[in-house]
Amino acid sequence: MEKDDKGFSFSGLGTKWEIVVDDEILKEDTKKTVLQYVKNFEGRFSRFLPNSETNAFRDSNAGDYVISEEFALLLAKADRLRSLTEGVYDPAVGGLLERAGYDAKYTMMPAQNTEEFVLPKWSVKNETLTINGPTAFDLGGMGKGYCIDRIAELLKSFGHKYFLVDGGGDMFATKKSNGSSWKVAIEYPGKPGIAAGLINLENQGLAVSDSFRRRWGKWHHLVNPKLKKAIEFVIGAVAVTPSAWDADCMTSALFFSESDRYSVISEFYKGSYLVFRNDGQAMVSPNWKGELF
Amino acid sequence: MKTKRSVIIIAIVVLVVALVYYRYFLKTPQTNVDESSTQATNELNITPSKEVSTIATYKVPDGEDIVKFTVTLDNQGVIMGVNAEDVPKKENVNLDKFTQNLLVVIKGKKLSELNNVDKVGTSSITTDAFNKALTELKSQL
């Protein structure tokens, strides 16, 4: 991999990013545009930044509010994911995460009153958000997936045809300039340094999510708002779809659904999946393409 | 349709049992993820890929289906492909039609055994360490 002169790395959205191009060297103005986009996105949508749009309604009264076009797009996608998981996924879970200790300061000290959390009700139509009271949103991985796809669009607008955008382990890749695909190893959930398999990415997005990385007490960052506890059965999920955004949504859907819903999820996002369970077995979609070790 | 789905589950279970039997009870050069030493010398012993198969027979509303599932593994015991064949018709069955998951046991493989990997897909927090380790290990190959 010639990444020294054909790519660049930066930090954003709480993780490391790397862009690898397989054609012309990235120009400085391309890099600047990408960096500016990510910085701007983080400022607008990070749950950890007090002035972000996701935090704009944490003290708001019930009512209708006009939101930005991009936030409406993100919430509309989240709304579809909420329906697909029959309400188990909900970006309004932000308040519950904070009570569980996953706050801006990473205190990781669970509060005692998580049982009292009442999930706010919200809906979005065009660019109007309706809430029934104070609401803290947490877009989770899907915001990062969206960002990966936007960066891919930016690269294309600067003339790049062959590249890979890696946003902290989730990615989107075109094909390589020689027509081949990008060979990507998939880390085994909870086993750093061990690969579970290999896939070939070509004009596809990939998302990998596990419940090990951000764990404290009995909580981790995947929380079922109905049961008010962390998801335990599934320990990791991998999705390959036509876009990184869909791949991120799909891993969330897999985490928050019973296994008999997997085929519906797979069809909805036009993707394939790999789900690691806590009994040591992995569930693989029939259309999965790639090696498993 | 429910009957068909449930028997497909049985067929998949049979397949998994065959796989588990093959991977754990037959001696294969499958890598143990807990081993600390590399197996570079073993990789020189190239043997042809192997196939394991099982035939599942089950009743459906309009008669009986007989499907042969075949799993192809390479010389490292890695699953390379799964094939299903309608035995009476001697036709391949499109696996996309199966709504059930395949259940497999994935043992994993050390990154030092992976060649020509462009990237590692991982949950975000460990990416730095993993990519750094990958770069370092590859430089030693």
Image: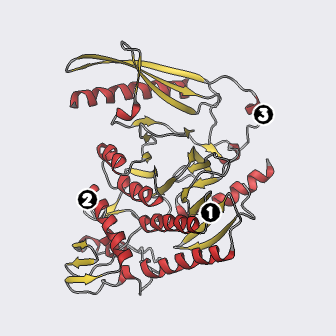
Amino acid on which disc 2 is placed: Ser
Left-right relation of A203 to B63: right
Q: Identify the residue position indicated by label 3 in the image.
A: B41
For marks 3 and 2, give the CA distance.
52 Å
Q: Position of residue A81 (x, y in %)?
A: 31, 60
The residue at 44%/61% (across/down) is: A245
Q: Position of residue A97 (x, y in %)?
A: 36, 72
Amino acid on which disc 1 is placed: His
Which is in the foreground here, disc 1 or disc 2? Answer: 1
Q: Position of residue A111 (x, y in %)?
A: 34, 76
The image quadrant where one finds the N terminus of chain B is: top left
Left-right relation of A135 to B50: left
The residue at 44%/52% (across/down) is: A235
Q: Is residue A216 visible?
A: no
Q: Which mark is residue A257?
A: none
Q: Which mark is residue A160?
A: 1
Residue A219: image quadrant is bottom left
Amino acid on which disc 3 is placed: Thr
Question: What kind of element bears circle 2?
Answer: helix
- Mark 1–mark 2 contact, CB under 8 Å? no
Kindly identify which chain the residue marked by label 1 belongs to: A
The residue at 73%/33% (across/down) is: B43
Kindly identify which chain the residue marked by label 3 belongs to: B
Sequence-wise, which precedes: disc 1 or disc 2?
A: 2
In the image, A141 versus B111, the foreground residue is A141
In the rendered view, tell whether residue A229 sits above or below residue A45.
Answer: above
In the rendered view, tell whether residue B100 sits above or below residue B50.
Answer: below
Q: Is residue A207 visible?
A: yes
Q: Identify the residue position indicated by label 2 in the image.
A: A83
For marks 1 and 2, give the CA distance.
36 Å
Left-right relation of A116 to A149: left
Residue A196: image quadrant is top right
